[in-house]
Image (cartoon, coloured by chain):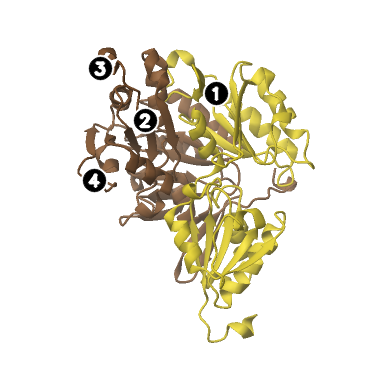
Chain colours: A brown, B yellow
Amino acid sequence: MTGAMQGRLPGTLYVIGTGPGSPDQMTPEAAKAVEASTEFFGYFPYIDRLSLRPDQVKVASDNREELNRAQAALQRAAAGVNVCVVSGGDPGVFAMAAAVCEAIDAGPPEWRCIDLVVVPGVTAMLAVAARIGAPLGHDFCAISLSDNLKPWSVIENRLRLVAEAGLVIALYNPISKARPWQLGTAFEILRAVVPAETPVIFGRAAGRPDERMLVMPLGEADAARADMATCVIIGSPQTRVIAREGRPDLVYTPRFLPAEAT
Amino acid sequence: MTGAMQGRLPGTLYVIGTGPGSPDQMTPEAAKAVEASTEFFGYFPYIDRLSLRPDQVKVASDNREELNRAQAALQRAAAGVNVCVVSGGDPGVFAMAAAVCEAIDAGPPEWRCIDLVVVPGVTAMLAVAARIGAPLGHDFCAISLSDNLKPWSVIENRLRLVAEAGLVIALYNPISKARPWQLGTAFEILRAVVPAETPVIFGRAAGRPDERMLVMPLGEADAARADMATCVIIGSPQTRVIAREGRPDLVYTPRFLPAEAT
Protein backbone atom coordinates (compact mmCIF):
# COMPACT_ATOMS: atom_id res chain seq x y z
CA MET A 1 0.00 0.00 0.00
CA THR A 2 2.85 2.37 0.80
CA GLY A 3 4.05 1.94 -2.79
CA ALA A 4 0.65 2.81 -4.19
CA MET A 5 0.56 5.95 -2.04
CA GLN A 6 3.76 7.54 -3.25
CA GLY A 7 3.20 11.03 -4.51
CA ARG A 8 -0.50 10.83 -3.79
CA LEU A 9 -2.29 12.93 -1.22
CA PRO A 10 -4.46 10.98 1.17
CA GLY A 11 -8.21 11.30 0.74
CA THR A 12 -10.78 12.28 3.30
CA LEU A 13 -12.38 9.60 5.42
CA TYR A 14 -15.91 10.54 6.47
CA VAL A 15 -17.63 8.55 9.18
CA ILE A 16 -21.32 9.33 9.03
CA GLY A 17 -24.52 8.34 10.78
CA THR A 18 -27.66 7.97 8.71
CA GLY A 19 -29.84 8.66 11.74
CA PRO A 20 -32.49 6.21 12.89
CA GLY A 21 -33.67 5.35 9.38
CA SER A 22 -35.95 7.99 7.91
CA PRO A 23 -34.05 10.05 5.31
CA ASP A 24 -35.63 13.10 6.99
CA GLN A 25 -33.58 12.37 10.09
CA MET A 26 -30.17 12.40 8.36
CA THR A 27 -28.44 15.80 8.60
CA PRO A 28 -27.47 17.87 5.54
CA GLU A 29 -23.86 17.58 6.77
CA ALA A 30 -24.06 13.80 6.40
CA ALA A 31 -25.69 14.18 2.96
CA LYS A 32 -22.79 16.41 1.85
CA ALA A 33 -20.27 13.84 3.07
CA VAL A 34 -22.09 11.23 0.98
CA GLU A 35 -21.93 13.49 -2.09
CA ALA A 36 -18.20 14.08 -1.60
CA SER A 37 -17.32 10.38 -1.32
CA THR A 38 -16.72 7.78 -3.99
CA GLU A 39 -16.40 4.56 -1.96
CA PHE A 40 -18.78 3.46 0.80
CA PHE A 41 -17.99 1.02 3.57
CA GLY A 42 -20.67 -0.27 5.88
CA TYR A 43 -23.32 -2.78 6.72
CA PHE A 44 -25.61 -3.23 3.67
CA PRO A 45 -28.89 -2.10 5.29
CA TYR A 46 -27.28 1.21 6.28
CA ILE A 47 -25.63 1.88 2.91
CA ASP A 48 -28.88 0.99 1.18
CA ARG A 49 -30.55 3.96 2.85
CA LEU A 50 -28.42 6.26 0.68
CA SER A 51 -29.20 7.26 -2.92
CA LEU A 52 -25.84 6.81 -4.61
CA ARG A 53 -24.72 7.92 -8.07
CA PRO A 54 -23.52 5.35 -10.61
CA ASP A 55 -19.87 6.39 -9.98
CA GLN A 56 -20.17 5.72 -6.26
CA VAL A 57 -19.14 2.24 -5.15
CA LYS A 58 -20.57 0.24 -2.27
CA VAL A 59 -18.15 -1.99 -0.39
CA ALA A 60 -20.45 -3.89 1.90
CA SER A 61 -19.39 -6.20 4.67
CA ASP A 62 -20.74 -8.22 7.55
CA ASN A 63 -22.01 -6.17 10.49
CA ARG A 64 -19.68 -8.04 12.88
CA GLU A 65 -16.47 -7.18 11.04
CA GLU A 66 -16.17 -3.56 12.07
CA LEU A 67 -12.41 -3.47 12.56
CA ASN A 68 -11.67 -5.09 9.19
CA ARG A 69 -14.06 -2.67 7.55
CA ALA A 70 -12.39 0.30 9.21
CA GLN A 71 -8.97 -0.91 8.05
CA ALA A 72 -10.16 -1.40 4.49
CA ALA A 73 -11.63 2.10 4.45
CA LEU A 74 -8.43 3.63 5.86
CA GLN A 75 -6.34 1.86 3.21
CA ARG A 76 -8.45 3.35 0.47
CA ALA A 77 -8.35 6.83 2.01
CA ALA A 78 -4.56 6.55 2.37
CA ALA A 79 -4.44 5.72 -1.33
CA GLY A 80 -6.16 9.02 -2.14
CA VAL A 81 -9.80 8.02 -2.33
CA ASN A 82 -12.56 9.98 -0.57
CA VAL A 83 -14.22 7.33 1.51
CA CYS A 84 -17.44 7.23 3.52
CA VAL A 85 -17.91 4.82 6.41
CA VAL A 86 -21.62 4.46 7.09
CA SER A 87 -23.26 3.75 10.46
CA GLY A 88 -26.92 3.86 11.40
CA GLY A 89 -27.88 6.42 14.04
CA ASP A 90 -24.84 8.35 15.27
CA PRO A 91 -21.45 6.96 14.24
CA GLY A 92 -19.95 7.73 17.66
CA VAL A 93 -22.38 5.67 19.76
CA PHE A 94 -21.52 1.94 19.73
CA ALA A 95 -20.63 2.27 16.06
CA MET A 96 -17.95 2.82 13.42
CA ALA A 97 -16.18 5.98 14.68
CA ALA A 98 -14.57 4.04 17.54
CA ALA A 99 -13.62 1.19 15.18
CA VAL A 100 -11.91 3.66 12.84
CA CYS A 101 -10.00 5.24 15.75
CA GLU A 102 -8.94 1.78 16.98
CA ALA A 103 -7.63 0.97 13.49
CA ILE A 104 -5.72 4.28 13.29
CA ASP A 105 -4.25 3.73 16.77
CA ALA A 106 -2.90 0.29 15.81
CA GLY A 107 -2.20 1.06 12.15
CA PRO A 108 0.66 2.47 10.06
CA PRO A 109 1.76 6.09 10.71
CA GLU A 110 0.36 7.31 7.38
CA TRP A 111 -3.18 6.61 8.58
CA ARG A 112 -2.74 9.48 11.07
CA CYS A 113 -2.32 11.87 8.12
CA ILE A 114 -5.73 11.02 6.70
CA ASP A 115 -8.29 13.81 7.00
CA LEU A 116 -10.79 12.13 9.35
CA VAL A 117 -14.24 13.78 9.53
CA VAL A 118 -16.77 12.26 11.90
CA VAL A 119 -20.29 13.55 11.16
CA PRO A 120 -22.68 13.23 14.10
CA GLY A 121 -26.23 11.98 13.74
CA VAL A 122 -29.43 11.25 15.65
CA THR A 123 -28.77 8.16 17.73
CA ALA A 124 -31.50 5.59 18.39
CA MET A 125 -32.28 6.56 21.99
CA LEU A 126 -32.97 10.17 20.97
CA ALA A 127 -35.32 9.05 18.19
CA VAL A 128 -37.18 6.65 20.48
CA ALA A 129 -37.39 9.28 23.23
CA ALA A 130 -38.85 11.83 20.81
CA ARG A 131 -41.56 9.43 19.62
CA ILE A 132 -42.76 8.73 23.15
CA GLY A 133 -42.36 12.13 24.87
CA ALA A 134 -39.22 13.01 26.82
CA PRO A 135 -37.97 10.05 28.88
CA LEU A 136 -34.38 11.39 28.62
CA GLY A 137 -35.34 14.77 30.06
CA HIS A 138 -33.12 14.23 33.10
CA ASP A 139 -29.79 12.44 33.73
CA PHE A 140 -29.44 9.24 31.71
CA CYS A 141 -26.97 6.67 30.45
CA ALA A 142 -26.47 4.47 27.41
CA ILE A 143 -25.23 0.93 27.94
CA SER A 144 -24.67 -1.76 25.34
CA LEU A 145 -25.94 -5.14 26.52
CA SER A 146 -23.64 -6.99 24.14
CA ASP A 147 -21.35 -9.26 26.08
CA ASN A 148 -19.37 -9.84 22.90
CA LEU A 149 -17.70 -6.54 23.71
CA LYS A 150 -17.25 -6.76 27.48
CA PRO A 151 -17.62 -9.37 30.21
CA TRP A 152 -21.20 -9.89 31.42
CA SER A 153 -20.08 -9.26 35.02
CA VAL A 154 -19.14 -5.68 34.01
CA ILE A 155 -22.58 -5.14 32.49
CA GLU A 156 -24.32 -6.42 35.65
CA ASN A 157 -22.22 -4.15 37.84
CA ARG A 158 -22.91 -1.12 35.63
CA LEU A 159 -26.66 -1.77 35.63
CA ARG A 160 -26.72 -1.93 39.45
CA LEU A 161 -24.69 1.26 39.83
CA VAL A 162 -26.63 3.37 37.33
CA ALA A 163 -29.93 2.18 38.81
CA GLU A 164 -28.69 3.15 42.28
CA ALA A 165 -27.68 6.51 40.81
CA GLY A 166 -31.28 7.07 39.67
CA LEU A 167 -30.42 7.48 35.99
CA VAL A 168 -32.74 6.70 33.12
CA ILE A 169 -31.12 3.80 31.24
CA ALA A 170 -31.03 3.33 27.46
CA LEU A 171 -30.00 -0.18 26.44
CA TYR A 172 -28.43 -0.66 23.02
CA ASN A 173 -27.99 -4.12 21.44
CA PRO A 174 -30.51 -5.54 23.92
CA ILE A 175 -30.99 -8.95 22.33
CA SER A 176 -30.01 -11.15 19.39
CA LYS A 177 -30.24 -14.83 18.42
CA ALA A 178 -26.80 -15.37 19.91
CA ARG A 179 -27.60 -13.36 23.08
CA PRO A 180 -31.15 -14.39 24.02
CA TRP A 181 -31.10 -14.19 27.86
CA GLN A 182 -29.19 -10.98 28.66
CA LEU A 183 -32.12 -8.54 28.48
CA GLY A 184 -34.30 -10.65 30.79
CA THR A 185 -31.45 -10.85 33.29
CA ALA A 186 -30.94 -7.09 33.02
CA PHE A 187 -34.63 -6.53 33.89
CA GLU A 188 -34.24 -8.82 36.92
CA ILE A 189 -31.21 -6.87 38.13
CA LEU A 190 -33.03 -3.57 37.72
CA ARG A 191 -36.19 -4.85 39.48
CA ALA A 192 -34.09 -5.30 42.62
CA VAL A 193 -33.33 -1.55 42.67
CA VAL A 194 -35.98 0.33 40.67
CA PRO A 195 -39.74 0.32 41.53
CA ALA A 196 -41.86 -2.21 39.62
CA GLU A 197 -44.13 0.52 38.21
CA THR A 198 -41.23 2.32 36.47
CA PRO A 199 -42.07 2.62 32.74
CA VAL A 200 -40.02 0.65 30.24
CA ILE A 201 -40.11 1.67 26.58
CA PHE A 202 -39.45 -0.82 23.80
CA GLY A 203 -38.68 1.48 20.87
CA ARG A 204 -38.34 -0.43 17.63
CA ALA A 205 -37.30 1.12 14.32
CA ALA A 206 -38.15 4.69 15.40
CA GLY A 207 -38.96 6.87 12.38
CA ARG A 208 -39.23 3.94 9.98
CA PRO A 209 -42.38 2.45 8.42
CA ASP A 210 -42.12 -0.62 10.69
CA GLU A 211 -41.83 1.49 13.85
CA ARG A 212 -43.36 -0.02 17.00
CA MET A 213 -43.42 1.63 20.42
CA LEU A 214 -44.47 -0.28 23.52
CA VAL A 215 -44.59 0.92 27.11
CA MET A 216 -44.97 -1.41 30.08
CA PRO A 217 -44.08 -1.29 33.77
CA LEU A 218 -40.69 -2.76 34.72
CA GLY A 219 -42.48 -5.36 36.87
CA GLU A 220 -44.08 -6.80 33.72
CA ALA A 221 -41.34 -6.00 31.18
CA ASP A 222 -40.91 -8.98 28.87
CA ALA A 223 -37.59 -9.30 27.05
CA ALA A 224 -39.33 -11.14 24.21
CA ARG A 225 -40.85 -7.81 23.11
CA ALA A 226 -37.39 -6.63 21.97
CA ASP A 227 -35.42 -7.56 18.88
CA MET A 228 -32.14 -6.40 17.33
CA ALA A 229 -33.75 -3.20 16.02
CA THR A 230 -35.07 -2.20 19.46
CA CYS A 231 -33.66 0.38 21.85
CA VAL A 232 -34.98 -0.26 25.36
CA ILE A 233 -35.32 2.72 27.70
CA ILE A 234 -35.93 2.09 31.40
CA GLY A 235 -37.20 5.12 33.29
CA SER A 236 -36.00 6.40 36.64
CA PRO A 237 -38.25 6.45 39.71
CA GLN A 238 -39.24 10.00 38.61
CA THR A 239 -40.34 9.01 35.08
CA ARG A 240 -44.08 9.57 34.54
CA VAL A 241 -46.74 8.39 32.09
CA ILE A 242 -49.46 10.73 30.78
CA ALA A 243 -52.58 8.95 29.51
CA ARG A 244 -54.24 10.64 26.52
CA GLU A 245 -57.62 9.72 25.10
CA GLY A 246 -57.32 8.50 21.53
CA ARG A 247 -53.55 9.07 21.50
CA PRO A 248 -50.58 7.03 22.70
CA ASP A 249 -49.38 7.60 26.26
CA LEU A 250 -46.60 10.14 26.75
CA VAL A 251 -43.62 9.11 28.86
CA TYR A 252 -41.33 11.77 30.31
CA THR A 253 -38.81 12.42 33.04
CA PRO A 254 -39.27 15.83 34.72
CA ARG A 255 -36.36 18.25 34.64
CA PHE A 256 -36.58 18.90 38.38
CA LEU A 257 -35.72 16.41 41.08
CA PRO A 258 -37.03 17.80 44.37
CA ALA A 259 -34.96 17.24 47.51
CA GLU A 260 -37.75 15.23 49.14
CA ALA A 261 -37.57 12.65 46.33
CA THR A 262 -34.01 11.67 47.20
CA MET B 1 -59.05 30.02 26.61
CA THR B 2 -61.68 27.27 26.56
CA GLY B 3 -64.10 29.72 25.01
CA ALA B 4 -61.68 30.67 22.26
CA MET B 5 -61.24 27.00 21.41
CA GLN B 6 -64.88 26.18 20.73
CA GLY B 7 -65.36 24.68 17.31
CA ARG B 8 -61.69 25.02 16.56
CA LEU B 9 -59.39 22.06 16.06
CA PRO B 10 -56.20 22.20 18.09
CA GLY B 11 -53.01 22.88 16.18
CA THR B 12 -49.84 20.84 16.09
CA LEU B 13 -47.15 21.57 18.65
CA TYR B 14 -43.70 20.73 17.31
CA VAL B 15 -40.77 20.57 19.70
CA ILE B 16 -37.60 20.69 17.66
CA GLY B 17 -33.86 20.71 18.19
CA THR B 18 -31.74 22.91 15.95
CA GLY B 19 -28.71 20.69 16.55
CA PRO B 20 -25.46 22.09 17.93
CA GLY B 21 -25.59 25.28 15.87
CA SER B 22 -24.49 24.77 12.29
CA PRO B 23 -27.56 24.77 10.00
CA ASP B 24 -25.97 21.71 8.36
CA GLN B 25 -26.54 19.78 11.56
CA MET B 26 -30.30 20.39 11.77
CA THR B 27 -32.33 17.55 10.25
CA PRO B 28 -34.72 18.00 7.30
CA GLU B 29 -37.48 16.77 9.65
CA ALA B 30 -36.84 19.77 11.93
CA ALA B 31 -36.72 22.11 8.92
CA LYS B 32 -40.14 20.81 7.79
CA ALA B 33 -41.56 21.41 11.28
CA VAL B 34 -40.29 24.99 11.05
CA GLU B 35 -41.97 25.44 7.66
CA ALA B 36 -45.27 24.09 9.00
CA SER B 37 -45.35 26.39 12.04
CA THR B 38 -46.50 29.97 12.39
CA GLU B 39 -45.50 30.82 15.98
CA PHE B 40 -42.10 30.10 17.53
CA PHE B 41 -41.37 29.82 21.24
CA GLY B 42 -37.85 29.60 22.56
CA TYR B 43 -34.70 31.23 23.78
CA PHE B 44 -33.71 33.99 21.30
CA PRO B 45 -30.29 32.61 20.27
CA TYR B 46 -31.90 29.31 19.23
CA ILE B 47 -34.80 30.88 17.32
CA ASP B 48 -32.36 33.22 15.61
CA ARG B 49 -30.69 30.22 13.97
CA LEU B 50 -33.83 29.73 11.85
CA SER B 51 -34.66 31.61 8.65
CA LEU B 52 -38.27 32.54 9.17
CA ARG B 53 -40.79 33.95 6.71
CA PRO B 54 -42.46 37.32 7.34
CA ASP B 55 -45.68 35.55 8.39
CA GLN B 56 -43.88 33.54 11.06
CA VAL B 57 -43.86 35.10 14.53
CA LYS B 58 -41.12 34.79 17.14
CA VAL B 59 -42.24 34.70 20.77
CA ALA B 60 -38.96 34.84 22.61
CA SER B 61 -38.48 34.42 26.33
CA ASP B 62 -35.83 34.10 28.98
CA ASN B 63 -33.90 30.81 28.93
CA ARG B 64 -34.82 30.16 32.57
CA GLU B 65 -38.58 30.30 32.06
CA GLU B 66 -39.04 26.97 30.35
CA LEU B 67 -42.30 25.95 32.00
CA ASN B 68 -44.00 29.30 31.30
CA ARG B 69 -42.83 29.11 27.71
CA ALA B 70 -44.20 25.56 27.36
CA GLN B 71 -47.56 26.68 28.77
CA ALA B 72 -47.74 29.67 26.44
CA ALA B 73 -46.99 27.43 23.45
CA LEU B 74 -49.61 24.86 24.51
CA GLN B 75 -52.24 27.60 24.87
CA ARG B 76 -51.61 28.76 21.33
CA ALA B 77 -51.67 25.20 19.96
CA ALA B 78 -54.93 24.55 21.82
CA ALA B 79 -56.32 27.66 20.12
CA GLY B 80 -55.62 26.14 16.72
CA VAL B 81 -52.19 27.56 15.89
CA ASN B 82 -49.34 25.40 14.59
CA VAL B 83 -46.61 26.14 17.07
CA CYS B 84 -42.90 25.34 17.15
CA VAL B 85 -40.97 25.15 20.43
CA VAL B 86 -37.27 25.53 19.66
CA SER B 87 -34.39 24.00 21.62
CA GLY B 88 -30.72 23.86 20.74
CA GLY B 89 -29.24 20.38 20.27
CA ASP B 90 -31.86 17.70 20.87
CA PRO B 91 -35.12 18.85 22.49
CA GLY B 92 -35.31 15.72 24.64
CA VAL B 93 -31.96 16.14 26.43
CA PHE B 94 -32.16 18.67 29.30
CA ALA B 95 -34.43 20.81 27.13
CA MET B 96 -37.94 21.79 26.14
CA ALA B 97 -39.59 18.41 25.42
CA ALA B 98 -39.65 17.57 29.15
CA ALA B 99 -40.95 21.06 30.00
CA VAL B 100 -43.81 20.62 27.49
CA CYS B 101 -44.68 17.21 28.95
CA GLU B 102 -44.63 18.66 32.49
CA ALA B 103 -47.01 21.40 31.37
CA ILE B 104 -49.36 18.89 29.71
CA ASP B 105 -49.29 16.65 32.80
CA ALA B 106 -50.33 19.54 35.08
CA GLY B 107 -52.48 21.39 32.54
CA PRO B 108 -56.12 21.34 31.38
CA PRO B 109 -57.47 18.15 29.73
CA GLU B 110 -57.64 19.80 26.29
CA TRP B 111 -53.84 20.03 26.14
CA ARG B 112 -53.76 16.22 25.90
CA CYS B 113 -55.65 16.48 22.60
CA ILE B 114 -52.96 18.60 20.99
CA ASP B 115 -50.96 16.83 18.30
CA LEU B 116 -47.51 16.81 19.96
CA VAL B 117 -44.59 16.07 17.63
CA VAL B 118 -41.12 15.93 19.17
CA VAL B 119 -38.42 16.08 16.49
CA PRO B 120 -35.07 14.67 17.62
CA GLY B 121 -31.77 16.39 16.90
CA VAL B 122 -28.01 16.11 17.35
CA THR B 123 -27.33 16.78 21.03
CA ALA B 124 -24.16 18.59 22.15
CA MET B 125 -22.24 15.58 23.44
CA LEU B 126 -22.59 13.81 20.07
CA ALA B 127 -21.33 16.89 18.21
CA VAL B 128 -18.38 17.33 20.57
CA ALA B 129 -17.56 13.62 20.40
CA ALA B 130 -17.56 13.69 16.59
CA ARG B 131 -15.15 16.64 16.46
CA ILE B 132 -12.62 14.91 18.69
CA GLY B 133 -12.86 11.27 17.57
CA ALA B 134 -15.10 8.79 19.37
CA PRO B 135 -15.01 9.28 23.16
CA LEU B 136 -18.59 7.93 23.45
CA GLY B 137 -17.69 4.70 21.67
CA HIS B 138 -18.47 2.64 24.78
CA ASP B 139 -20.97 2.94 27.66
CA PHE B 140 -21.57 6.55 28.73
CA CYS B 141 -23.88 8.84 30.64
CA ALA B 142 -25.15 12.42 30.44
CA ILE B 143 -25.50 14.36 33.68
CA SER B 144 -26.57 17.97 34.11
CA LEU B 145 -24.42 19.78 36.68
CA SER B 146 -27.12 22.35 37.34
CA ASP B 147 -28.10 22.27 40.99
CA ASN B 148 -31.01 24.54 40.14
CA LEU B 149 -32.74 21.35 39.02
CA LYS B 150 -31.70 18.87 41.69
CA PRO B 151 -29.89 18.92 45.05
CA TRP B 152 -26.10 19.02 44.78
CA SER B 153 -25.85 15.93 47.01
CA VAL B 154 -27.67 13.94 44.31
CA ILE B 155 -25.20 15.14 41.66
CA GLU B 156 -22.21 14.17 43.83
CA ASN B 157 -23.66 10.73 44.45
CA ARG B 158 -24.36 10.20 40.75
CA LEU B 159 -20.84 11.25 39.75
CA ARG B 160 -19.30 8.75 42.20
CA LEU B 161 -21.53 5.90 41.05
CA VAL B 162 -21.05 6.44 37.30
CA ALA B 163 -17.28 6.80 37.80
CA GLU B 164 -17.24 3.53 39.74
CA ALA B 165 -19.27 2.00 36.92
CA GLY B 166 -16.50 2.94 34.47
CA LEU B 167 -18.76 5.03 32.22
CA VAL B 168 -17.62 7.93 30.08
CA ILE B 169 -19.34 11.02 31.53
CA ALA B 170 -20.79 13.92 29.52
CA LEU B 171 -21.55 16.95 31.68
CA TYR B 172 -24.21 19.38 30.48
CA ASN B 173 -24.65 22.85 32.04
CA PRO B 174 -21.18 22.58 33.58
CA ILE B 175 -20.80 26.16 34.75
CA SER B 176 -22.46 29.59 34.81
CA LYS B 177 -22.03 32.88 36.64
CA ALA B 178 -24.52 31.71 39.25
CA ARG B 179 -22.90 28.26 39.51
CA PRO B 180 -19.15 28.89 39.47
CA TRP B 181 -17.75 26.10 41.72
CA GLN B 182 -19.70 22.99 40.76
CA LEU B 183 -17.50 21.84 37.86
CA GLY B 184 -14.30 22.11 39.90
CA THR B 185 -15.90 20.08 42.69
CA ALA B 186 -17.07 17.51 40.14
CA PHE B 187 -13.47 17.11 38.90
CA GLU B 188 -12.30 16.60 42.49
CA ILE B 189 -14.91 13.90 43.07
CA LEU B 190 -13.95 12.14 39.85
CA ARG B 191 -10.20 12.34 40.62
CA ALA B 192 -10.84 10.18 43.68
CA VAL B 193 -12.12 7.36 41.44
CA VAL B 194 -10.77 7.81 37.89
CA PRO B 195 -7.02 7.82 37.00
CA ALA B 196 -5.41 11.29 36.74
CA GLU B 197 -4.31 10.65 33.14
CA THR B 198 -7.90 10.11 31.91
CA PRO B 199 -8.60 12.58 29.08
CA VAL B 200 -11.10 15.37 29.66
CA ILE B 201 -12.60 17.16 26.64
CA PHE B 202 -13.84 20.74 26.86
CA GLY B 203 -16.03 20.98 23.77
CA ARG B 204 -17.27 24.49 23.20
CA ALA B 205 -19.75 25.49 20.47
CA ALA B 206 -19.13 22.35 18.37
CA GLY B 207 -19.88 22.98 14.71
CA ARG B 208 -20.09 26.77 15.10
CA PRO B 209 -17.57 29.40 13.97
CA ASP B 210 -16.45 29.99 17.57
CA GLU B 211 -15.85 26.28 18.20
CA ARG B 212 -13.02 25.44 20.59
CA MET B 213 -11.93 21.94 21.57
CA LEU B 214 -9.48 21.35 24.42
CA VAL B 215 -8.19 18.06 25.78
CA MET B 216 -6.33 17.75 29.07
CA PRO B 217 -5.76 15.00 31.63
CA LEU B 218 -8.24 14.83 34.52
CA GLY B 219 -5.39 15.51 36.96
CA GLU B 220 -4.90 18.95 35.36
CA ALA B 221 -8.47 19.67 34.29
CA ASP B 222 -9.28 23.30 35.04
CA ALA B 223 -12.95 24.23 35.40
CA ALA B 224 -12.15 27.77 34.24
CA ARG B 225 -11.72 26.39 30.70
CA ALA B 226 -15.49 25.78 30.48
CA ASP B 227 -18.31 28.24 29.95
CA MET B 228 -22.07 27.96 29.45
CA ALA B 229 -21.62 26.83 25.84
CA THR B 230 -19.28 23.98 26.78
CA CYS B 231 -20.05 20.29 27.04
CA VAL B 232 -17.42 18.55 29.15
CA ILE B 233 -16.69 14.88 28.45
CA ILE B 234 -14.62 12.89 30.95
CA GLY B 235 -13.24 9.65 29.56
CA SER B 236 -13.27 6.26 31.23
CA PRO B 237 -10.04 4.49 32.25
CA GLN B 238 -10.11 2.87 28.76
CA THR B 239 -10.30 6.17 26.81
CA ARG B 240 -7.20 6.74 24.68
CA VAL B 241 -5.52 9.68 22.95
CA ILE B 242 -3.91 9.35 19.49
CA ALA B 243 -1.28 11.99 18.74
CA ARG B 244 -1.18 13.10 15.09
CA GLU B 245 1.52 15.27 13.56
CA GLY B 246 0.06 18.55 12.30
CA ARG B 247 -3.46 17.55 13.30
CA PRO B 248 -5.39 17.70 16.59
CA ASP B 249 -5.22 14.66 18.86
CA LEU B 250 -7.96 12.07 18.49
CA VAL B 251 -9.71 10.88 21.64
CA TYR B 252 -11.66 7.63 21.58
CA THR B 253 -13.03 4.89 23.81
CA PRO B 254 -12.53 1.41 22.35
CA ARG B 255 -15.59 -0.73 21.73
CA PHE B 256 -14.06 -3.73 23.52
CA LEU B 257 -13.43 -3.94 27.25
CA PRO B 258 -11.20 -6.97 27.82
CA ALA B 259 -11.81 -9.06 30.96
CA GLU B 260 -8.31 -8.31 32.28
CA ALA B 261 -9.14 -4.58 32.37
CA THR B 262 -11.88 -5.08 34.95
Which quarter of the rendering shows the N terminus of chain A?
top left
Do circles 2 and 3 both sit on a common chain?
yes
Question: Which element carries disc 4, helix, strand or loop?
Answer: loop
On screen, residue A102 versus residue B239, left or right, reads: left
Residue B38: quadrant of the picture: bottom right
Q: What is the CA distance from the residue labelled 2 to the residue labelled 3?
A: 18 Å
Marked residue chain, label 1: B
Residue at the disc numbered 1: B236
Tag 3 near tag 4, CB within 8 Å:
no
Q: Earlier in the sequence, mark 3 or mark 4?
A: 3
* Kind of residue at disc 3: Ala
* Kind of residue at disc 2: Leu
Q: Position of residue A155 (x, y in %)?
A: 46, 28
Question: Which element carries disc 3, helix, strand or loop?
Answer: helix
Q: What is the CA distance from the residue labelled 3 to the residue labelled 4?
A: 26 Å
Q: Earlier in the sequence, mark 2 or mark 4?
A: 2
Q: What is the CA distance from the residue labelled 1 to the residue labelled 3?
A: 38 Å
Q: Nearer the viewer, mark 1 or mark 4?
A: 4
Residue at the disc numbered 3: A4
Q: Position of residue B151 (x, y in %)?
A: 74, 42
Residue A70: quadrant of the picture: top left
Residue A32 shows in this picture? yes
Residue at the disc numbered 4: A53
* Kind of residue at disc 1: Ser
Residue at image position (70%, 30%) is: B225
Marked residue chain, label 2: A
Tag 1 near tag 4, CB within 8 Å:
no
Q: What label sits on residue A13 in the rendered view?
A: 2
